[in-house]
Structure formats: C-alpha cells, structure tokens
Amino acid sequence: MTPTRLFLDHAAGSPTLPVVVDLMADLYRAGIGNPNGGHTEARRARAILDDARASLAEDLCVEPRQITFTATASEALALGLHSVLTPTVPLVTTAGEHRGARALAAQHAAAGGAVELVALDAEGAMQAAGIPANRPGAVGLFALASGEVGTIQPWATFAAAWRASGGGALVVDAVQAAYDHALDAQVTGAAHLVVGSAKVGGPFGIAALISAPDTKVRPIIVGGGQERGRRGGTEAVVLAAGFAAAFRAHRLQSAENRQHLTAITNAFDAALGPLASLGLVPTGAPFTSGARLAGHRSYAADWALGDDLVAALDHAGIAASTGSACISGSREPSEALRAMGHSEAESRGGLRLSFGRSTTIEEAQGAAAVVRSVLERVRTAVPA
Amino acid sequence: MTLTTTPLGGLPVGWQAAPEAATPERVLVALSGGVDSSVAAALLVEAGHEVVGVWMRLHSAADQRDGHRKSCCTLDAADDARRIADQIGIPFHIQNLEQEFADAVLEPFVAAYQSGETPSPCVGCNTAVKFGALVGKGSALFGCDAVATGHYARRAVSDDGRSWRLRAALDTEKDQTYFLHGLDSAAIARARFPLGEMTKPEVREFARSRGLVTAEKPESQEICFVPNGDYRSLLRERGAASGEGDVVDESGAVVGTHAGSEGFTVGQRRGLPGSGVSARYVSSVDPVTNRITIAPRASLNVRDIALIEAATPEGLITSGATVQGLARIRHRGALAQGTVTGLGGGAATLALDDPLWAPSPGQTVVLYDGETLVAGARIARPQPSV
C-alpha cells in the first residue's frame, strides 16, 4: 500500500473542518445536551440550537422558523416529499437523482402513485420541454446539481417552465449545489429544499429541510413536539451548531473556493492529458463549463466496472468513487448515465474524482500521474 | 492431532512439496466470511506477505440477509469478511464477478439438470471464478502475484520447477483437491493454500487465539446460490424443471412415477419404491423421455466410465495418451486404480481395475499419482458393467 493517501471523494462528504471539530468538542466538553427542559442547562442548549438555526437561516435567506433539522439529507428529502405528496398525486422526477430520491419515487410507484421522468440531455441537464403537460398539480422532485456527473441544472428556466405547465409543489435537493455556490432558498421556488452538513465540511449526521413560509411540514416521526412538531426526537444540538458553523465558513469563502477548485481541476486535467488515450469519456457538463460543479470530474470507461477502478485507485492511495451509490458491488448500470445516452458498458464504468478546498495543485498533479498509470495498467490487463 | 501420511501415499518420484515463498509476495485473498479463509489471510499476514482481501459478489442471492445464513455469499458474509480484514489490518474490496459466475457456474448448473446430469458447481467456480477471473482481477487491479483461499489443499512442483500439481491436504478428511481439479499448472503456480498442513480443529484454535470474529462460525455446506438447498425451485424459475414422468426398471417396465427427473441423481435411493434386499437405486436419468431407470445396487458397479473434459494440469489429454492413477468419483469417495485413455477433444475413457459404484454423469472424476492430482474430468455416460 502507498502510505500517503489523497482524498478525492469530497462530493460524498468532506472531512469535518478543524475549526468545526474544535467548536463541537468544546460544546461536548461543556456538557451541552438536551435542549428541552425547564432548567438552565436546557436553556443553554436551546440557545445554541436557536443560534445555529438563525445562522443557517441567514445563509439561506429564510426565517429560522422555516428550518427543520433532520439526521440526514435523505430523511429531509423524505420529510419534504411526505409533506406534499399523497398516493393520488403524480410525482415528476428524473433518472439522474440521488439514490435516496429515486428510492422515494419507487416507493410512490409501489403505492400505486404515478411517476413520470423528465428527460436528461447528453450533459445531464433536465429538459424543460420534457415536463409533462397533462399533470397539473404534480409534485416535482429534483436536484439543483448532480453529484454523480457534476451538472448544475438550468434551474431558473426549468422552474419557470414548471410553473407555466401548472406543476405543483417542488421538493428540491440542494445538497451538492450548496457546496458549489451561495443559495437563496426563496428564489428556487421550492416548497421544501434540502441542505446537508457533511458536504460543506460540517459533521455527518445532520441536515436540514427548508420549507417555504406557507408550507406545512407533515411529520414522519411523531414524538415530543420537537422542531415545532415537525420531527419528533431530541435535537442534536452540537451537530446543529457544527453544521451551522461549517455552512457559514463555507458561504464566506464560496467565491474563493470556487476559484481554488477551478484552478486545481484545470491543473489536474492538464496533467492527466487526453482522456481518449486512457479509454475514458467525460460525463456530464463540459469540464470547462460554468454549468459544472467546481472541483468535480466524472468519466465513464466501457472496458471496466467503476467499482474495479475505484478499488485499484484505492490501492494506489487515491480515494475515488463511481459517483452512483451502489450496494455491495452490484453491477447495475447507472440510471443517470443510461438516461444521458451512455452505453450500458459505459454506464457500469462510472468514475468520479471530486476535489476539496484542502487539495493542493501539487496533489492534483500528482494524482493525475497516479490515475494515469493505474488506468493504463488496468486497461492493459483487463481486455474489454 | 498429527497426520503424517494420506491413504494416497507420498509424493511421486520427480515431484517435491511446493516451497514457501522466499520473499514477501503481494497476495489476493478470497475472503468468504468463514473461518477458513479468515485464518488463511491471517497466516499470510503473519508470514510477512502484503495481503489484499476481497469478497466476491457472485449472484443476487447475495442480497439476502436472512434464511440463508450458512452461505458464503450473503451480505452477512460480506460483513464478516470486512470485519476480518479490519481485524488483521489488510485492505478490503468487494469484487463483482456476477457475470463470470453466471457464465461458468449458474448456466452450466441449469443446463446439466436439463441434460439429465448432476452438476458440480464448486468445480466450475474454483476453476473459472476464484482461480480464473479473480486471479486476473487481482493482477490487474492490485498487482497481486498470487491468489490464496481457505481451501484444504497443497501444491507440488516438479523437480525441474516447470510443472505444478495439486497435492492432497495433510488432513485427508478435509482435503478439497477433488473440487480444485480444474486448475492447470499455471493456475496452481499462482495459487496459495495456507491451510494445507492444518486440521480443522487447528484452524479453529488459531482463529480463537487471534480473537478472529469468525472463529466459531458454523461451516457452510449448501450450494451458495441455492437458498435452503432448494435447487428445484431455481430450475422452475428458469423454466428448466420437468414435470411428472415414469420410473422404470431395467427391463423397461413402468414401476411408478416421479415428480420431475431433475430431482434424481444416479445412485439415489430416496423417493424410490422397494426396501431391504429389493432396494432399487437410480441407474440412469433420461431427460428426453423424462424417465428414470432404477436397478438393484449391484447393477451400479462400473469398471468403464466415459469422460469429457479430461485433462492433466498440462492440458487436455490427447488422443491415445494414457494417465494412470488412483481414481475417485466422489469427494472423499472410494479409490480404485485406473487408466484414462484419451480419445481426442477432451473425450476419454477410464478403465478401472476394480469397479466403483454409481458414477453420476456431470460429476467429477480425479486421478491421483501418489498424493498429487494428476488428472481430472467430468463423467459422461457410464458403460454397463461386465
């Protein structure tokens, strides 16, 4: 094993920022616990939770009462959808959504609900022309950007077309987009919008649902009235504080980060050389396009399984991903890549490298040399 | 427990025990999530080798967590394999070999029943998957020189160092060379069997002494891709099950009916009429007429057996070539001296000095020269005994 490791899977969650770790450790040491109670200790915890909510609200241009903390983004997505969707309401989504969202759509279909897919173009962008015209009041479930292929959706155009077609409530996954650029939740027009903590350098185990002012949240977990009765269970105060601190730090450095990530991915591309000579095709929006998540590179190989490439790179010291979450080495092709017109073989051979603010230019260039040599070795040894 | 010899005898002239690697190697270990492969991996780590652990995802039965606990191929097994890798400090990867497994094991399994044979899926899995595709992946993805498993087997090398053979495990009760016979000389050269000199109790004791989480895990014995051993429902799912048919005696007279010929194998007694001295056994299965023939026990003794895919570790047995040795037609079954004569294209005949009982088409024949495995084949159609 190569002793030095390089983490290039930031799209799956970045290591928690040191300043956030320190903050959380201080809070844990101070004994911060349950914010629900009539005593001083509970009020102290409540104040920290209130501050976290207020900070996050300010960053997303909403009021604190619009925020519901959840354990994960998948939970927040489920909660948002549960609030607006009933079995008789049609659901419109795409084949390019995160696995969690696709599972929710599958659940709706299994319950007898109608599910329709909006087509993706070859770059993974949603086609406004594909919005079904005959589904007034349909609920839309869409991500602002694809974690798998890095495409930032033409959201303003799409949302306008959605409204014009008579579409109903929008449940929006902003987890990847929030890492890329500053967000105004109101402007998205979402009834419910989801942001996560780990992607912006906050702790794992917390996320948030941002609901439009006049939109009711229908709880899945009922309990002691926490989160205004929207989500039962004691709030994770310290995680919320870490989430809010990371989100704030990230927002303040957003432009700087984008610049840095663009510089390192450009250096990586140059050092890696022509993709065709490695048997790779790029996936998603063009690498130099503004419609691509900063720091995100995705490819497909028609001569190997993505999981195998990830394993070989791991052995060479690089943490990469296929981009599409899968269970225990399943060789199902990526639905997103299929929907974008990639062949079945390519759709099994997805590879994603996602850089973070901590990656240096030198590391990116070094990574390119390792990626090239690993891919060349594997490609020679495993004929198509 | 100390074992010094096997009923097969020692190493033949011109062959020696495979030596230990002189320098550390990079070895891929196929972790099944059981105690044997766990100990195999731990032994290699302790011997100073650079070890990479993999768990093979072979089929969709792997998605089950309950009701199939003894298999090596469930998510529970994958969890155990991952925990072992963590315990002994090696990298761990899941390798998807579903396609290779379907081609080399699953499809032939179904086809065998459709043609009235009894398949031997572990042989195909060892030859084409574990010591075939996995070796290629280990080399391509991780630069591994060798692949190790938790099989009970050893290796022998010719005095000139050019040829390799399987050698029976020291513990003859556990010896698994029968299921490994498809490995050719090159595959054997790259195979590692760290448990070849150990008994099962020694393996368990080693696992306990290292605190391995799989130390007390029960043995897996069923066919890994057939939950609860119900292979007939697998055949039904694939439209490969036959319906009711006749049971006839040696004269061709109908003596009863059966619920599907794929439920029977040559030598089977269960589910047939008669008992005691009148007991009858399946003597042949005809998939075309869906008819099972039964006969008295003595009728199933056979001296001449037709073979296909007959090969030595050096390749197919060519027309006119002969190989002599102690033949075995079942895992740990009786041994009889015999000669295989090649007929071309892998076809061959096995002439036995003493008869063996009930060779079953589709099953494996192996021949030992001393304790080395010198040839293997699949049983085609048996000739009537003289």
Image (cartoon, rainbow, N blue to C red):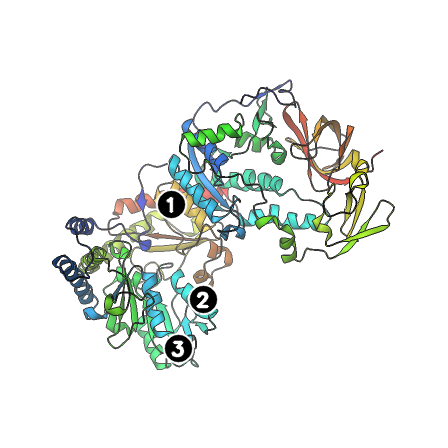
Quadrant where the N terminus of chain A is found in the figure: top left
Task: Give percent across and percent down for residue A3.
Answer: 32, 36
Q: Nearer the viewer, mark 2 or mark 1?
A: 2
Q: Nearer the viewer, mark 3 or mark 1?
A: 3
Mark 3 neighbour density, 10 Å: few (under 14) some (14–19) many (20 or more): many
Task: Give percent across and percent down for residue B127.
Answer: 59, 39
Which residue was labeled with disc 2? A106
Side of B68 relative to A228 (left or right)? right
Mark 2 neighbour density, 10 Å: few (under 14) some (14–19) many (20 or more): some
Separation of marks 2 and 1 at Cα, in angstroms: 36 Å
- Say which chain tag 3 marks: A
* Quadrant of residue A57 within the rendered picture: bottom left
Label 3 sits on what residue type? Ala
Task: Give percent across and percent down for residue A55.
Answer: 17, 63
Separation of marks 3 and 2 at Cα, in angstroms: 16 Å
Q: Which mark is residue A138?
A: 3
* Quadrant of residue A121 within the rendered picture: bottom left
Which badge, 2 or 1, comes first in the chain's sequence?
2
